[in-house]
Amino acid sequence: MDKTMFFRILNSEMELATGCTEPGAIALTGAYAGAELNKLGEAIQRMEVKASTNIIKNAMAAGIPGTSYTGMPYAAAIGAAAAAPERKLEVINGVSDDVYKAAELLVETGKVNVELAKVPQKLYIDVTVYGPTHSARAVIADLHTNLVLLEVDGKEVFKADPNAPVDTGRDVVTPEEIAAFLTVRKIYDFCDKELDPMNDPIDIIRSAISVNGEICERGMEKDYGLAIGPNLERNCRAGVMTRDMVTNSMIITTAGADARMAGAPFSVVANSGSGNQGITTTMPVVSLAKWKEIPEDKMVRAVTLSNLIAIRIKSKFGRLSAMCGASVAGTGAACGITYLLGGGYDEICRAIHNMIGDVTGMLCDGAKADCSLKISTCVNAAFQAAFMAMRGVRVESTDGIVEDNVEYTIDNFAKLGNEGSGPMDAAILEMMLNKREA
């Protein structure tokens, strides 16, 4: 087996990011525009931000790392004021106080206008910054770091060729290529038989284990957001829950999401453009391996398996959807958990059927504190799916969207995430933008 494509896919779909990915992408778009205005020696006086429904939904309430700020205006203003697009999705990490002050002034004086962009793309961000005499505009679309247009004073200085490979400064494998290459069978055979976990070039997997483990540890140190992880631990100490290996995984994983959604200034390794998905594909598997004292090489195989399954589903499911990405990541985790429990290919297929029979339909109503609550649900479901699979039990093909062939079950799940998203996204955003007084 040629393993090169697996390594390319892992490095393409997993990357280091700080804070929620959608505010990060907004900040990056602002940074591209701000950098162009900087070249002209002008300071930003006002900004216009346009974004697709899914971007607005996922950025409205997400915390900005290193600050007490939330939302799109601050993300765009901080990125534009920082003007460091070379930092990609870490553009808002560790910026100076002057940048924060400049961004705060723009937002608090009403100089950052946000509008819905009526575009077909689920991922679309358009930022224009205005100085005293000049303006600059940047557009990112389809992928969180994919710059497609740059203008200065209305004149095009860069436009991506729509027929050329996406240029993000990395070796990007397209969703179409991933979907054509990956199957559950190929992923299992690679992870179980072909992968040399201690010597193959899978540094991104090792980073996911260490970096995502770090934010989970930090998430237990204080009450971030809803503090789902710390409160689960308090429940155990109070005797109303038992800290078994399932609850332990829920505590560890959700603590990382608590910290991330509150804007804690710690990096994560994202999966398919989502830091929460990176945490959820990785940490339940790592925590189980440590609980059962499973050797490191098998843990690395299981984490790789989990991440590749999630990537395979997301290649058809799409970057953004009306359905919660934790259900996709939880499905990957269920496979990694099943592998650590001694399951083979058949058991892993059962685990996928069980997860899709269970958590399909969980809504994504934006990136916010209660994402960690949804993650706790999916981690719990992942263990249940794995335990059922190991007993030879699966949701049958007579039930719901589940079919006999695991690939067809995944296709049905992805079809819902795509074709079912448009009206649902619009309805969700309308509710989010028009909250009623009590």
Image: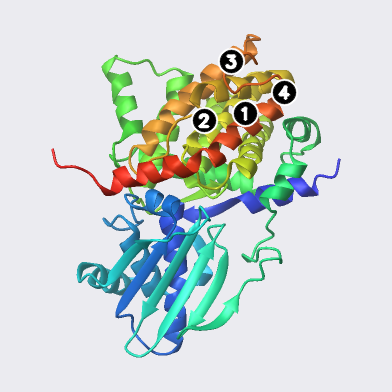
What colour scheme governs how the chains and residues are painted in the rendered image of this protein? Answer: rainbow
Q: Please name which of the two marks, 4 or 3, marks the residue nearer to the observer.
A: 3
Examine the rendering and report whether any part of residue 91 can be seen.
no
Among the 4 quarters of the image, the one containing residue 45:
bottom left
Q: Position of residue 217 (x, y in %)?
A: 41, 39
Cα separation, mark 2 vs mark 4, equals 26 Å
Q: Which residue is mark 2?
A: 284
Q: Which residue is mark 4?
A: 405
Q: Residue at x 56, y 82 (%)?
A: 157
What is the residue that sits farthest to the right in this orientation?
1
Examine the rendering and report whether any part of residue 308 can be seen.
yes
Among the 4 quarters of the image, the one containing residue 50:
bottom left
Circle 3: residue type: Asp
3 and 2 marks in contact (CB < 8 Å)? no
2 and 4 marks in contact (CB < 8 Å)? no
Residue 78, placed above or below residue 412: below
2 and 1 marks in contact (CB < 8 Å)? yes
Q: In terms of sequence position, does the residue under pointer 4 or pointer 3 come before the other? A: 3
Circle 2: residue type: Pro
Instruction: Identify the element where label 1 is drawn.
Output: helix
